[in-house]
Image (tube, rainbow, N blue to C red):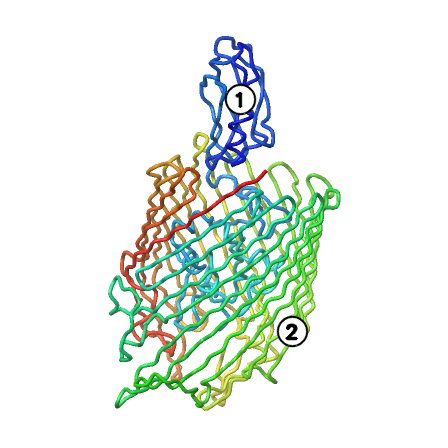
């Protein structure tokens, strides 16, 4: 509304021969574009030239002849340069087109916000636009297309990942820099991380242990949430439907006035379960309590909610926020023979709560950041005996039928960022963590770990082309001896070429369960090991990319990269001599990754093709004739064609996962082989924006067009969480519809 008011009032001019002419510069959403460079040259008199900057209302004013024909050129950061011949009128409105993904800014592992191309570390961005067009609801669904990342699905423990051949317990997951807690079997359930209010996702492959400590050994994923930046009110609502039985509804309210902004968001995600026999399209209905009650993909219901308040002043900014998550997974059991009148049903209930308080202080040219956070995670398993004739439920009294675990994390992070000179910036900081775990499967019912670390990084721009970034972290831990963690990153840029190289140490601390597990019943005897050493690694990587900007709104980019990750003191569960199990450090593991990426982007078409060849170390190669590394290929393609520019596009997401082989020794000292077949995922969607300001966005698509449901595994050890037919990777071919409607009321 403010921009329209500007257009209607500030552009009114006198109709004299020489008049005060105003030019309003706006973006595609009719928002004012301030500080744009304006160049005007008369066609009839080339010596008559005018330069100016648009004011904070996006308006440039000058004395010029009405109806004069001029060459108008406007340049603004983040927008395509406008150049055209214009006939000056009383009302002149110029709309600039945003540049797509050319100068994205990143913060993960950085001393200050840095452009993607200037970052010393290699960072990949997934934008909110990509999330919308893929139809992804949670983190698992958007990472499934990424090469060098493998997503694994467990019916009960949820979605997990590995990066570069290293398991998900070596991957740090952050939300606005705050670690996500609540690992089951070492992994964060990615399907519990909702993307409805996400601005972008930053992915760093390789160690960032200097910056973020434990678990950042193989990679770091930082999820950046949306914040209100303009004065006024913004309301959004986003329903989502998928034919496999997904019914979601999320929404957000953001309001900013002056220095303060307030935000609320929430939603419900519901999935009624899926099996191979389910029809393609089915609405919820009552069903018989027979053998069809058992679902391959378990029914689940999630609730999410969040609130935040930000106050920004000239020299400081404070933000307080809280989020809440609740999930229930229902694992219906097969009716018991001989009469099939009862069944065991398991309920897995998870609650997460996160509270964050952050302060940023500007002290002359330096900045002090203080981050305080408390994370709460609670998970229960309840088993009921369900009478299928009366539908009455009674808690089961069998061993292991009921279980509760709780984990808390209190953290404080302090960063001081400053510069010795324009070419030498530094960051020093403190990380203070206090982890606490409760549960009957933890020794003595409760255990605590304190981890207190100091870290420092230096960003030294030796020349305009060469940047060197060393780093160091030292920690004191109350339960184990922490290693000293160094890193060295180098960036060299010359013309269109960029070279990045890194040598970095990473580590993963043993978690509370690995140290203090006490799981003993008639079926289990698993104990922790308080003498465990942290896993540590050395990572060596390089990245070479060539980028050529095509015209002013396109580019061609080619990347070659290679990385070697060498892990020592690997922690695993192993059998003791008496047949019981405990956690031990078993030796070494390494992985080797080669990648090739091609990005081609023009006005209407964008193609990203990414090939990875990942090798995983085979420890048995030391004593047998087996290959030292087993390699697996991966290919990802993400293509977009804008049928109507900025309004209608068709999108293709494809991922090929090559076959995997691994080896083990059985009780007879024989080598056993485990082979997992290759498979592909193909999704297609159509995204359209409606209304003048694109307030309504709709995405209609089809997921899993190749109808891949399970992947055959030969030599697989079955468990209660896996399917006897192989690994579950897809719910068959499904259709989805995603809508997002924004209401904006802007105020000056």
Q: Secondary structure at mark 1?
A: loop
Which residue is identified by label 1? 12
Q: Give the CA distance from mark 2 to mark 1.
A: 68 Å
Mark 2 Cα shell of 10 Å, populated few (<14), some (14-19), many (≥20): some
Q: Secondary structure at mark 2?
A: strand
**Which of labels 2 and 1 is toward the front?**
1
Where residue 281 sits: x, y (%)?
A: 26, 62
Which residue is identified by label 2? 449
Where residue 46 sits: x, y (%)?
A: 52, 10
Check the image and report above or below for 586 versus 77: below
Check the image and report above or below for 599 versus 187: above
Check the image and report above or below for 450 versus 108: below
Task: Say which of 267 and 465 sits in front.
Answer: 267
Tell me if I can see residue 625 in this picture. Answer: no
Q: For the C terminus, which image quadrant?
A: top right
The residue that appears at 38% across and 51% down in the rendered structure is 739
Tell me if I can see residue 276 in this picture. Answer: yes
Quarter location, residue 292? bottom left
Quarter location, residue 357? bottom right
Where residue 16 sits: x, y (%)?
A: 53, 11
In the image, 481: left or right of 695?
right
Residue 575 bears which disc, if any? none
Quarter location, residue 428? bottom right
Whichever of labels 2 and 1 marks the residue nearer the N terminus, that label is 1
Task: Say which of 669 and 26 sits in front.
Answer: 26
Task: Say which of 652 and 164 sits in front.
Answer: 652
């Amino acid at each position: 509304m403010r921009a329209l008011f500007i257009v209607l009032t500030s552009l009114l001019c006198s109709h004299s021969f020489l008049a005060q002419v105003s030019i309003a510069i706006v973006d595609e959403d009719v928002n004012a574009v301030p500080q744009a460079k304006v160049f005007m040259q008369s066609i009839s008199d080339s010596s008559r030239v005018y330069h100016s900057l648009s004011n904070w209302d996006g308006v440039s004013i000058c004395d010029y002849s009405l109806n004069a024909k001029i060459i108008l050129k406007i340049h603004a950061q983040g927008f395509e340069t406008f150049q055209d011949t214009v006939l000056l009128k009383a009302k002149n409105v110029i709309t600039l087109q945003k540049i797509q993904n050319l100068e994205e800014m990143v913060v993960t592992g950085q001393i200050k916000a840095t452009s993607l191309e200037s970052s010393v570390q290699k960072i990949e961005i997934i934008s909110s636009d990509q999330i919308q067009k893929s139809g992804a609801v949670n983190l698992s669904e958007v990472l499934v297309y990424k090469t060098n990342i493998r997503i694994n699905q467990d019916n009960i423990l949820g979605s997990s990942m590995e990066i570069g051949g290293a398991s998900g317990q070596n991957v740090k997951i952050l939300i606005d820099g705050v670690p996500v807690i609540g690992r089951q079997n070492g992994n964060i359930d990615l399907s519990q991380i909702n993307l409805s209010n996400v601005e972008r996702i930053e992915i760093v492959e390789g160690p960032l242990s200097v910056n973020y400590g434990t678990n950042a050994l193989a990679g770091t994923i930082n999820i950046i949430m949306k914040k209100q930046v303009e004065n006024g009110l913004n309301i959004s609502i986003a329903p989502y439907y998928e034919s496999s039985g997904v019914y979601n509804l999320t929404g957000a309210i953001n309001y900013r006035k002056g220095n303060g902004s307030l935000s609320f968001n929430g939603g419900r995600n519901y999935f009624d379960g899926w099996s191979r026999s389910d029809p393609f399209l089915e609405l919820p209905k009552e069903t018989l309590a027979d053998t069809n009650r058992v679902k391959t993909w378990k029914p689940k219901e999630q609730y999410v909610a969040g609130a935040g308040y930000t106050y920004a002043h000239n020299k400081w900014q404070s933000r307080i926020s809280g989020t809440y998550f609740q999930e229930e997974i229902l694992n219906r059991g097969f009716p018991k023979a001989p009469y099939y009148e009862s069944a065991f049903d398991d309920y897995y209930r998870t609650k997460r709560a996160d509270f964050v308080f952050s302060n940023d202080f500007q002290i002359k040219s330096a900045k002090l950041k203080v981050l305080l956070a408390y994370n709460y995670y609670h998970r229960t398993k309840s088993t009921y005996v369900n009478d299928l004739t009366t539908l009455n439920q009674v808690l089961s009294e069998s061993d292991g039928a009921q279980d509760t675990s709780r984990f808390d994390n209190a953290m404080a992070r302090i960063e001081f960022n400053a510069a010795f000179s324009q070419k030498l910036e530094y960051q020093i900081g403190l990380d203070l963590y206090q982890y606490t775990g409760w549960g009957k499967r933890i020794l003595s019912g409760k255990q605590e770990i304190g981890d207190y670390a100091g870290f420092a990084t230096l960003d030294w721009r030796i020349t305009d082309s060469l940047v060197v970034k060393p780093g160091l972290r030292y920690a004191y831990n109350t339960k184990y001896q922490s290693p000293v963690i160094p890193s060295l990153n180098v960036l060299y840029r010359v013309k269109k070429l960029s070279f990045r190289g890194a040598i970095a140490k990473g580590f993963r601390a043993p978690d509370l369960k690995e140290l203090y597990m006490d799981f003993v019943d008639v079926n289990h005897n698993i104990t922790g090991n308080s003498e465990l050493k942290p896993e540590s690694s050395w990572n060596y990587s390089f990245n070479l990319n060539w980028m050529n900007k095509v015209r002013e709104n396109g580019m061609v980019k080619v990347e070659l990269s290679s990385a070697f990750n060498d892990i020592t003191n690997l922690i695993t569960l192993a059998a003791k001599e008496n047949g019981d199990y405990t956690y031990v450090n078993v030796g070494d593991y390494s992985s080797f990754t080669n990648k090739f990426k091609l990005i081609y982007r023009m006005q209407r078409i964008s193609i990203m093709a990414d090939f990875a060849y990942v090798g995983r170390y085979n420890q048995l190669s030391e004593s047998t004739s087996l290959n030292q590394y087993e390699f697996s290929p991966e290919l990802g393609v993400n293509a977009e064609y804008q049928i109507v520019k900025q309004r209608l596009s068709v999108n293709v997401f494809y991922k090929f996962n090559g076959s995997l082989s691994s080896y083990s020794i059985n009780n007879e000292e024989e080598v056993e082989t485990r082979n997992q077949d290759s498979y592909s995922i193909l999704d297609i969607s159509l995204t359209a924006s409606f209304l003048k300001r694109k307030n309504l966005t709709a995405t209609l698509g089809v997921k899993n067009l190749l109808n891949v449901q399970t992947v055959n595994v030969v030599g697989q050890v079955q468990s209660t969480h896996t399917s006897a037919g192989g690994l579950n990777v897809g719910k068959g071919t499904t259709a989805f519809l995603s809508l997002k409607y924004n209401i904006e009321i802007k105020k000056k």
